Amino acid sequence: MPAPPAPKPAGTPGTSISKGPATSAAAAQARPTAIQRPTAVSAAPSIKTIDKVLIYTATVAALAGVGLNFYVFFFVLKPLIETFQP
C-alpha cells in the first residue's frame, strides 16, 4: 500500500479558503468606511384631492358617454331603421 501524500504547506494556493487573522485585520483597516446614504424619498407622491376629483369626474363622464351612445342606438336609431325595412 502506498503512503498517503504529504500535506501541503499553509502558504500554497488552494489549501485554505479563510485567511489568517493578520491578513483579515489588515484588509479591514485598508477598506474605506461605509458612508450612510440618506433615505430615499418615495418615488410615487400621494395623489392630491383635486386630482382624485378630476379622476372620478372623468370616469363618470366616460360612463355617461357610453350609456348615451347605447341609448341613442337602441331607442332612437334602431326603431327608426326598422320602420324603413320591408
Image: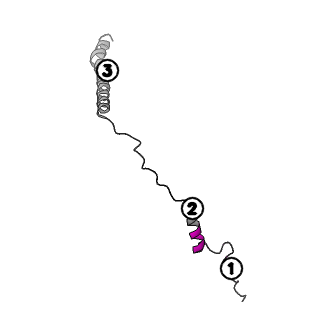
Which is in the foreground here, disc 3 or disc 1?
1
- The one nearer the camera, 35 or 48, is 35
Mark with earlier residue (2, 1): 1
Circle 3: element type: helix
Which disc is residue 9 wearing? 1
Q: Quadrant of residue 25?
A: bottom right
For badge 2, the amino acid type reads Arg
Circle 1: element type: loop
Residue at the spot 70% in from the left edge and 84% down from the top edge: 6
Task: Kindly report the distance in space between the C-alpha atoms of the residues bearing marks 3 and 1.
Answer: 89 Å
Which is in the foreground here, disc 2 or disc 3?
2
Write the start and end of the magenta stretch as one range: 5-26
Mark 2 and mark 3 in contact? Answer it, CB < 8 Å.
Answer: no
Mark with earlier residue (3, 1): 1
Left/right of residue 77 with respect to residue 10 in the rendered view: left
Which disc is residue 27 wearing? none
Left/right of residue 80 with respect to residue 15 in the rendered view: left
Tell me if I can see residue 31 in this picture: yes
Left/right of residue 85 with respect to residue 10 in the rendered view: left
Task: Kindly report the distance in space between the C-alpha atoms of the residues bearing marks 2 and 1.
Answer: 29 Å
Which residue is disc 2 drawn over? 31
Circle 2: element type: loop
For badge 3, the amino acid type reads Asn
Crowding around mark 3 (Cα neighbors within 10 Å: few <14, some 14 to 19, many 20+) is few
Which residue is disc 3 drawn over? 69
